[in-house]
Each structure stands twice: as C-alpha cells, then as structure tokens.
Amino acid sequence: MGGPAAPPRRRGRGSPLRASPFPRADRGFATAGVAPTPAPTGSRLWPVRRVSSAKSPPPAESVRSGLGRVVGRRHTDRRSRRLARRREARWRRIATASGLLGGYLLDAALGDPRRLHPVAGFGTAAAALERRMYQPTRAAGARYAAVAVGVPVLAATALSLATRRRPVIRAALVALTTWTVLGGRSLHRQAGALARSLQAGDLDAARRRLPNLAGRDPSALDERELARATVESVAENTSDAVVAPLFWGAVAGLPGLVGYRAVNTLDAMVGHRTLRYAEFGTAAARADDVANLVPSRLTALAFVAGAPLVGGSRRQASWIWFRDGHRHPSPNAGQCEAAMAGALDVRLGGRNVYFGQAEDRPTLGDGRPPEATDIYRAVRLSAAASGMAVAVAVLRALSGPWRRLIRRRRASG
C-alpha cells in the first residue's frame, strides 16, 4: 500500500505484454522444417501483397482497341496528306489559269515588249549555237534542235517545280511568259497598218511592212497579192502566235509555253527548204508540225464559229475547210487558211516566192481575190478566235477543280 507499482507480468520468455494471436513462426521465428502459416487476408496487423511471377496477357479487347487507334491514326494522316496534295494542285491550276488570262490581257493592251524581248534573246542564242553545231546533215539538225529546245524547257520546268507551293509567284511567272510568247496585238497592228497603206495607195510602204508578217519577197507584188499575203499571214499566225501558245500553256503550264515558242522560233530560223537548211532544218520543221497539229485545227474551228461576225457563213466556211484544208503543202497552215478563205468568201493560194524560190500552191476557196478591206475582216476574225482560245485555255487549266466541284454538288444533291 502506497509503495511503487509492481512491474507488468511477462508471459513466457520474450513474450510481449499483449500476446500475438498468430504463432511465433509467423513473426519470423520459424524453426527449420516448419512452414510458416499464411496470415489472413483481412488482418490489419500483417497485410499481404500477392505478386505474380509472370505478366498476364492483355485482354483481346485491349489489343483490338490499340490496333484500331493505330490504324485510325494512319488513315487520318493519309487522308490529311491527300487533301493537302489536292489543295496544292487546285491552287497550281488556279495560278496557271490566272497567269494565262493575265498574259493575254497584257499582250492585248501592250503588245510585244519593245526592249529586251526574251524571244529575241533566244533567237540570238540559237543563232550562236547554230554557228557551232551546223553540219549539213539531219543528225546535226536533230542535236541542234534538242539542245536549243531542251535547255529552256528544263529551266522552265525547274521554275515550275520551285513554285509548286507559291501560287502568287507561279501566276506572275506564267503571266509574264504568256505575255512574251504571244503576238496577237503585234500581228493585228502590222496587218492594220498594211491595210491602211494599201487604201492610201502607198504600195512601197505596204511592201516594206510585209516582211513583218510573211517571209515572201514583196518586191513584185501588186495590191491584190499584198492583200492576199496579209490575209494568209493573219490566218496562219493566229495559230502560231496566239492559239498554239495558249493551248500548250493550258496543257503543260510554264514548260509548255517556253517549249512551244522555242520550237516555233527554230522553225522560223532554220525550217526553210533552202540549200543550207534542207537537211539541217528538218528536225525543227517536223517538231513545229507536231506542235501545231492540234492548235491549227482548233484555230480553223474558231474561224468557222466566228464566220458570222465578219458577214460569212459557218456552213460555207466548214465546207471550204474540209475540202481545201489538206491541199496546202503545210499540214497545219492549210487548215487555218482554208477556214479563213471560207469565212471571208475569198480565194487564197497561188504563186509565192520565198528566198528566191517560186512555189505554185493550189487555190483555197471559191470567192474573189482579197482586197484591203478584207484585211480588216481577217483581223476581226482573228481577234474573235483569240478570245475563244483564251477562254478555252482558262477553262482547261481549271478543269480539275471544276470537275471535282461538279462531282461534289452531284453527290450532295
């Protein structure tokens, strides 16, 4: 009583104040050969974590969902790339069409550049190349044409590839190139000036102007022969200077514009049947024939369509075109001249003198010989054909986007 408290009783050796409900072996004191008794799962004194020695395989649903996400992501990326390519192609087409239209309007308003004309520069370079490569053989002429045409086409192709994703720069390049390769305004201006000289009775001035339009000798030509030469030149050069460049620009873009003008310039330089170029100029002449095969027929078709604008008949123009178009020595010039003769109701063809050599050509058409007033009619018909050509070229350049737009509207409707 009143003394110190008695120490707590111990139960056995090493036993704590509160006995564990589990055997000693469960607390790490197992003896050899005795397996420990597992603790109950719900015990809060000895929690047990069960660790599996091998990883269980994921469920099939998880595998399928993962694969689905990967495939879906790839499909989305592929679809995005496809849409991006379509968008770039659409803008390229729009840029080409805008450039063709802009170049045509520049030519109609300004005519050919008065200084530093690229076509004149190409002619100078081609003449220098001819002096180095000339041999009186067709093989040498083919090598010359390949180099003279291939180099500018490769340069134009490089520029076209460099502006694939720059539609504004692409449109500007196409517009400037189209302006330089077209010659409709200059053709109409020279033809009108010659017609005014004929109406004024100034044959000398008309003879001086004819070499700007045709390559024949004008020294012995009278008024009717000068008028015939001018009408024939307007008919042929409508294809060479307007329709064909627009056609190749719509089909092949910038390389088409440059390539056609290079081929046509080489034909004007070496594609003559003279002693020097009889063999050497064959390749250039054949290339020009191939390049103008389709544009010349399109030009003739435009002349037939525009015949009523100059007081002609479409039926008569069509008949003269189909009847006389193949009678010309050239496979392309005859198409344009025959359709022009039928639309104007005049007679073209006859004896021409080129570089001192006379050529007797069959007549085209059944009408009267052309006069000075017929030159104005030919210019009006040429302008109408040029307008049709640029409209078709722009629509052709836009054919991809328009086709897809029409298809979408039909699908949605």
Image: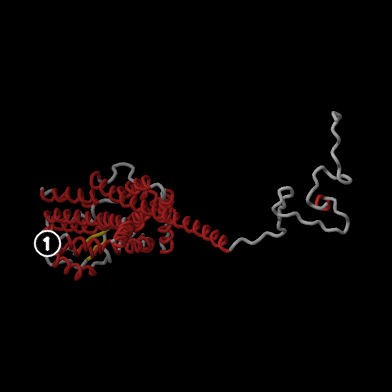
Give the residue at mark 1: 312
Q: Nearer the viewer, residue 251 or 189?
A: 251
Q: Position of residue 308 (x, y in %)?
A: 12, 60
Q: Of all residues shown, which one is farthest toward the bottom?
A: 323
Can you tell which quarter of the image residue 215 is in? bottom left
Dot 1 surroundings within 10 Å: few (below 14), some, or many (20 or more)?
A: many
Which residue is found at the position 17% from the left and 54% from the top? 379
The quadrant the N terminus occupies is top right
Relative side of 66 to 132, left or right: right
Q: Position of residue 407 (x, y in %)?
A: 31, 61
Q: Of all residues shown, which one is farthest toward the front?
A: 1
Q: Position of residue 322 (x, y in %)?
A: 20, 70
Give, as a three-letter code, the residue at label 1.
Answer: Gly
Relative side of 277 to 213, left or right: right
Find numbered disc 1 in the image and state the secondary structure of the residue it sits on.
Answer: loop
Which residue is found at the position 84% from the left and 38% from the top? 8
The quadrant the C terminus occupies is bottom left
Q: In this orientation, does residue 131 appear?
A: no
Q: In this orientation, does residue 122 appear?
A: yes
Numbered label tally? 1
Relative side of 313 to 32, left or right: left
Which residue is found at the position 80% from the left and 44% from the top? 18
Can you tell which quarter of the image residue 364 is in? bottom left
Q: Position of residue 77 (x, y in %)?
A: 48, 55
